[in-house]
Structure formats: C-alpha cells, structure tokens
Amino acid sequence: MTKPKYKTMGQQFGRRSWAEPWKIKMVEPIKMLTREEREKAILDAGHNTFLLRSEDVYIDLLTDSGTNAMSDRQWAGIMLGDEAYAGSRNFYNLEDAMRDHYGYKYLVPTHQGRGAEHLISQAVIEPGQYVPGNMYFTTTRLHQELAGGTFVDVIVEEAHDPSDLHPFKGNVDLEKLEDLVKREGAEKIAYISLAGTVNMAGGQPVSMANAKALRALGDQYNIRIFLDATRAAENAYFIQQREEGYQDKSVAEILLEFCSYTDGAWMSAKKDHLVNIGGWLAVNDAELFDQLRNLVVVYEGLHTYGGMAGRDMEALAIGIVESVDDHHISSRVEQVQYLGAIMLDWGIPIMQPVGGHAIFLDARSFYPHIPQDQFPAQVLASQLYLDSGIRGMERGIVSAGRDPETGDHRYPKLELTRLAIPRRVYTQSHMDVVVEATKELYDNREQTRGLKMVYEPKQLRFFQGRFESL
Ligand code: P71
C-alpha cells in the first residue's frame, strides 16, 4: 500500500481529532453575492459593516452577541414561556440557574447587557467619582460616563501590546489601581469594574489569582467589585487550561469561585448564555438590590421580567446550564484557537495570545502605510467584506470615539478588526474560508488606501458612522 497522502486536521496538529459536541437539526441557507454586488453593498453602507444587510453577508463574524445557535432544549423552553406580567415561573428558573452557577443572592433581569450597565451605573456612581477597570468597553464606559463617572484604565501594560504572550492579559494592574486609590481617596472610587475575558483587549482572560488579590485590595479600601460576566464562562475555561491548580476543576466550579471574589455582576446573556436576547444584573447586597429593583421598573420592565418575554427567560435559564458544560466550552474556545493557529502559522498579524470569542486582526501591522486617523481597522473590515462577503467589526479609533474634554479622537494603542465567532453556528470549513480570504487581503495589502469619515454620530459613532475612500 502506498503511504496515505492526506492528513485529517487533528493529524496536522499532531493530535487525535475532536468534533463539535452537537449535531445539526436545522440549517439556514447562506449565499455569496458577486463581487459587483458586494461592491455596491459596501458603498451603500458607507464602508461600515454595521450598515450592511445581513442577507448580503456570506459568513457573519460581526459579533458573537445574540448570534448563537440555541439548542433543541432551549427551543423547547421557548414553548414553556409563562407570559404572565408578574411572577412568571421562567423568572424563578432563571434566578435558580444564576444562583447555581454564579452564586449571587439577588437577580434583576434586563433586556440585554447595556440595560444592566445603565442600572448599576445609575445606582452606584456619584458624579465626579472614578471607575477603574481592566480596559473600557464601549457601552459600559458610556453608561459610567452618563452617570457622571470617569473610567480609568488599570489593565496590565501587556494588554496594550498585541504580540505580548502573557497568559492573563486581562489582569488588573494592582499597582496602577492602588496608585489611583491613594491619589484620589477611596471615597472617590465608585467601584472596580472587572471584566472576564476582556473584549477590547482581544478576549484576554483574568487569572483567579488576580481576582483574589483584587478582592483583598477591595476589602482593604472598602471598595466594591462588580464583574462584567458577559464572557466569564470562557474566562473560567482559560483558568482551567492555564492556571496552576485548576486543571482538575470543572468550568462550573471555577466560574463559581471567580464570582465569589466579586460583589455582583452584570451580564449580556447574548454571549456565553447562548440566547438571542437577554441580560441580567445580580448582587449580594440587599439594600442595593432594593434600589436596583426600583430602577428596573422605570427603565426595563417589572422586576420579574425586566424587558424579556417569559420564553426568553426560559431559554436563558437553560442556556446558563449549557454554557458551563466542559465539552461545550472547550469546543467553542478551541474553534477560535484553531482559526488563530492557522493565521499565525501563515504570518497574518493578529492579537496574541488568541482569546476566547474572536480573532483580532492587527490592522496597524496589516496596513502600516495607513495612518490611524484614516481608520486602518475600518478599512480592513470593509476590504474583507469586499473580497469574500465576510463581515467583521472595527475595534480601533472609530470605536474609541472622542475625548469628551478635548473633542479630539481618542487614539487607542490597539487598532483591531474583530472577527467574532458565534457559538455553535459555523463549522471548521467556514473557518478555513475565513483564513484563506484574510491571507488574500494580506498578500495584496500595499495597494489598499485609507478612509475619511463623512458622517459622525455623537454617541457610539462606530454603529452608524459613514466613510468614503481616499
Ligand atoms: C459585542 C457586543 C455587542 C456590541 C456592543 C457595542 C458595540 C458593538 C457590539 C456587548 C457587550 C460586551 C461586554 C463585555 C457589555 C456588552 C453590552 N458586546 N459588556 O462584543 O461585549 O451588552 O450588547 O447585550 O447590550 O459584539 P449588550
């Protein structure tokens, strides 16, 4: 017999292959437009991928938010919706699931993450206070600012360097934090805003040791810690894989321990929890809970639905349980790692180490000839769509917005184009298409030119801003 010519993917990586821990029961057809059609679509969208129609997209990596595939059980849960205005049984199921897996005492449901950010910011920030955190997130910081707070970045320095291989680049720099506390006084700190797998840093995790040390510091100065738990289950997986002493613990156990070092959390359930809509806020303090419960009826809905239908809460309760399953979470994160490993091997500049939910292309290295105020990451997102109908998202100077004091652009160190992978939606073949398309752009990068902004909204300009080619 001749020596076999082909290798399976596992063999190419020197291991036995593994496959997704699910099978497909229903499919949604997708199609690729012609080059001319894509050209028209991206021009109509002002080079902003948020303004494309989803039907014109072939592989949609705009976000992993609300784009996940629900399981048959979650869909069955949809049929069990109790659409009572008050006291829906689905709310109590949600409350139980949150308590079992996050361990907080009190739950306030919200329509999605930013609803929860609004409530917590209004409740605990006094105008003039600081909110230190491990890198900003767009909506989080905006709500902190709207409540009169000032966000202060206290993430470790390594997080700002796309090639630094630190295994926990989401960690808080405790020295930076303590300096701020000493300089401004503990009473000027509203709370510590801690995020699991830091989105804007490339999906980088926070170590358990860092969370523990943060707790000690919080206790010393009497400052509360609130967790953005949006991708905390993915964070727990990285702890299991990378942190001494956690290899034999389940993701569920790790998540519970991680949350135990914080005083509460907000959640965009559209990510880890495998639903299309939903969110919540949870705290341990009864008085704060009372305040939040009063606020939620003003802005979201009654405290037993907070803007969600009963069926949404049921799908979410089931999603929480599925999200901490070790097989689920490893296949989710390892799919992202697979895509990243090939990109790195092919010399495509990406943020390292590869995070939990997305690949972040390093647009500065991709297009060194395009200055930051000509929006290199926006250019890259636009070009990727043009080349192959793949939709990513700008996470650079456009996302960073303007400094409210000076009115000038904020110039972030990271100028990234994010390719976020929805959970349980795409296969390995889709990942292969994505990496080949990116390589094509990389090989032809020198001809590509910058953009100018021709329409700029005041808030969160990346959503609706429009651009033209230079
Ligand atoms: C993402 C999103 C959705 C999004 C939001 C803003 C601009 C572009 C895309 C949402 C998050 C998040 C974190 C860490 C809070 C929210 C808000 N992420 N914290 O990554 O990642 O949650 O969308 O449910 O309101 O595409 P919400």
Image (cartoon, rainbow, N blue to C red):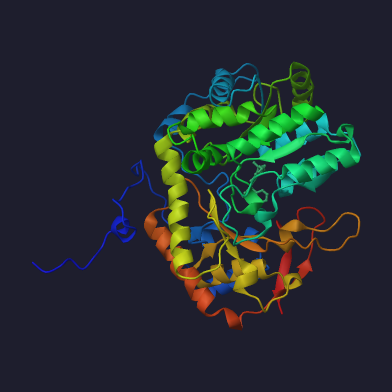
- Residue 23, quarter of picture: top left
| Quadrant of image for the N terminus | bottom left
| Residue 148 in sight | no
Frontmost residue, 252 versus 303:
252
Measured as percent of width and height from the top left, residue 116 is found at: 71, 34
Name which residue lies at 70% across and 26% down: 263
| Residue 321 in sight | yes
Left or right of 468, for residue 235: left
Q: Is residue 391 above or below residue 454?
A: above
Measured as percent of width and height from the top left, residue 432 is found at: 40, 63
Left or right of 206, for residue 407: right
Measured as percent of width and height from the top left, residue 115 is found at: 71, 36
Frontmost residue, 459 versus 283:
283
| Quadrant of image for the C terminus | bottom right
Measured as percent of width and height from the top left, residue 244 is found at: 50, 38
Q: Is residue 307 above or below residue 289?
A: below
Q: Is residue 103 above or below residue 211?
A: above
